[in-house]
Amino acid sequence: MLFALTCAFCIPILIGMERDSKGLAIVIRSVKIRDNDRLLTLFSPSLGILQAVAYGARKSIRSIKAPLYTEGNFSLEKTRRGTTLKDIDVISTHSGIMEDLDRMQAATLFSDLVLTARSAEPELYALYASALDALEDTGFERVVTQFIVHFLTLEGLSGDYASCPVCGRGYGEEEILGFSASEGVAVCHDCDTMDGALLLPPRARAYLRRSIEIPFRDALSLRVSEEQGHRIARYLLRTLPFSFPGKLRSLEYGIWKL
C-alpha cells in the first residue's frame, strides 16, 4: 500500500510498506520528539527513505537503542499513529564517527546529500554505508573527496575530467581547468565562467579522473600527498554548491573552512 509521511523536521517521504516490515537500513537522521522518544529517518535499499518512531524507556514498551548512523536489519510496525521501531539486529553503530568533530561533520554532509537527493537506490546505499565505515579508520578528507566524486557520478552530475563537457574538446595533459557555475562542472579555460576562481591543476584532475574509474573502496587507496589531498577536498567542497542542485545546510552552517 502506498502512503505519504510528512514531518516538520524532515522532507516529505513516499514509500510502499506493509503493516510489518523488515529490512537493512541506516539511521541517517535522529530527532528528539518527546522526553524519551526519537523520530528516526531510515535509509534502506529495500524500503526507501522512511521515518519511524523509536520509543524510549516506558513501562509497557521495551526501549530499543538505535543511535545515529547505526546500520542493521530493522523490524518496523505500521500503526494508526505511524511507523514504529519494533527491533533491530545491529551490524554496526559507527560509534567512532561520534568521537571526532571532523568525522561527524563529514557524515552530516553525506546524510544531507542523500536526503536532499531523495534517492534510495541500492548503489547509493552501498556508497553511503561504505563511507561511514571508512570514516572510522581513514582520513576524513580522503573519504569526503571520494564520497563527493562518486555521489556526483551516480547522480549524473560529474564530468569525466577527460574532455570539456561544454565544448567537447579533449584536455591537454598539462592543462589547468576552470569551472562553469551554470553547468556545475570543471571545464576548459575557454568555457570558464568563474574568471579563474576555481582552478583544477593537472595532477588533481588526473586523481579525480582515476577516482571515478574505480570503485569507492579502491579509490580510497589511490596515492596522493596530504597537502594535495587537502586541496582537492577543499576544491570539491567549494564547487559542490554549484554541482549539486539542492540546498545543503551542512555546508551553510557547518565547520568547513573553505
Image: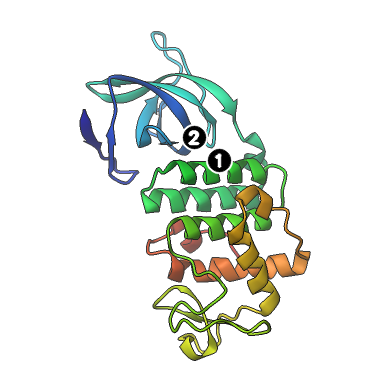
Sort mark 2 into few (<14), some (14-19) or many (20+) by Cα contacts within 10 Å: many
Q: Nearer the viewer, residue 55 or 137?
A: 137
| Quadrant, the C terminus | bottom right
Q: Earlier in the sequence, mark 2 or mark 1?
A: 2
Image coords of residue 38 (percent x, y): 41, 30
Taking 62 as reference, is 206 above or below it?
A: below
Q: Residue sitting at 66 percent across and 45 percent down? A: 134
Q: Residue at x 76, y 69 (%)?
A: 227
The residue where tag 1 is placed is 129
Say what amino acid the circle numbered 1 marks. Answer: Ala
List x then y, in percent, for residue 34. Answer: 37, 29
Q: Residue at x 38, y 53 (%)?
A: 117
Question: Compared to 93, does 171 lie above or below?
Answer: below
Mark 1 element type: helix
**Count the marks: how many?**
2
Discs 2, 1 touching: Cβ within 8 Å: yes
Indicate left or right for 145 with 80 as reference: right
Q: Which residue is mark 2?
A: 26
The front one of 34 and 191 is 191
